[in-house]
Image (cartoon, rainbow, N blue to C red):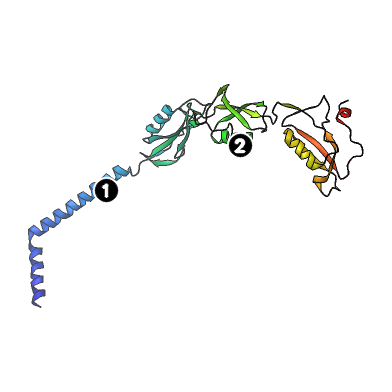
Amino acid sequence: MDFLIKLWNKIMYLLKDKAFWLNSILFFVVLIITGWMLLFSLKLITKWGQSADVPNVVNKNVEQAIEMIEDVDLEYEIKDSVYRADLKEGTVLDAQPSAGLNVKTGRTIYLIISSKRPPMVAMPQLAGRSSLRFAQVELESRGLKLGSLTFEPSNEKDAVLSQRIGNTEIAAGTMIPKGTVINLTLGDGLTGVLVDVPNLMGKTKSEVDLILSANGIIANFFYDKNIEDTMSSYMIKQYPLPNNEEKLNLGETIDLFFSKNKPKIIPTDSALRK
């Protein structure tokens, strides 16, 4: 009870003290002024209530685009450049945020502009390790273009023998501009070496294989339906024929036809060459 009486007396004393009321009023005035200044500062920092429409700067020259952006109190940043040979350098290709969008003033507009300078890419290793199909995929994946094709005798058809810019050999790993045209020399599947057509008439498939292997000749084989053992079947017809006029380009194929039965008449080399 004494505690409550003492507390009440202290409260009454403070209420009658002019200094207490003066300090309290001063405290609330400072609190209000500080709050107002803080709110005003936040408005300035966040540009509260201030906005602008993003101007349409696509297809504009970058200098003109920057002027249009700054005129509405917005910022800009060139984010990237893209190689475009068909456009004047510095043409705005894209802008984010998009034109017409209402944003706060001071917002940054990111620009993508065109460039006349193509990016550099490494020339892939095509010669000696790829076919035409693989070479096309490799070139396209690096932004390079396939140019003219020339052919030279080779056992491997469409194998890349050389890679060139114009008539100059280009080594793998060389840095070249994206969009460069690469000319290729390919194998035509032929060696350029001419050989006589062997007389295979009446020989078994196993004998034929030995002769073809010894001469480096490739063949297409055709069999009658009634043949049970291909290795013991007989060659009954061939194209081209073994005569003085017909020659095989090493790497070129010969067509051979087999039957179950050995032909009754087997023409000699001299007869076939007449």
Q: What amino acid type should be assigned to the residue bearing mark 2?
A: Phe
Rendered image quadrant of residue 44: top left
The residue located at (14%, 57%) in the rendering is: 24
| Near-viewer residue (129 or 271) | 271
Q: How far apart are marks 2 and 1 (CA)?
A: 66 Å
| Near-viewer residue (200 or 181) | 200
Instruction: Look at the numbered discs 2 and 1 and tell me whether their residues touch, using CB distance below 8 Å.
Output: no
**Left or right: 115, with 271 as reference point:** left
The N terminus lies in quadrant: bottom left
The residue located at (64%, 29%) in the rendering is: 186
Question: Secondary structure under badge 2?
Answer: helix
Q: Nearer the viewer, mark 2 or mark 1?
A: 2
Residue 109 at what x, y percent from top left? 41, 37
Which of the numbered marks, if any, corresponds to residue 82?
none
The residue located at (21%, 52%) in the rendering is: 32
Q: Quick one: which residue is furthest to the right in this view?
A: 264
Q: Residues within 10 Å of mark 1 (few under 14, many from 20)?
A: few
Residue 231 at what x, y percent from top left? 80, 45
Which of the numbered marks, if any, corresponds to residue 39?
1
The residue located at (73%, 35%) in the rendering is: 214
Counting every numbered tag in the picture gives: 2
**Left or right: 73, with 155 as reference point:** left
| Near-viewer residue (1 or 114) | 114
Vertical placement of 147 versus 44: above or below? above
| Near-viewer residue (196 or 10) | 196
The C terminus lies in quadrant: top right
Residue 191 at what x, y percent from top left? 69, 28
**Left or right: 263, with 19 as reference point:** right
Q: How crowded is mark 2: few (under 14 residues within 10 Å), some or many (20 or more)?
A: few
**Left or right: 18, with 193 as reference point:** left
Question: Secondary structure under badge 1?
Answer: helix
Residue underneath mark 2: 134
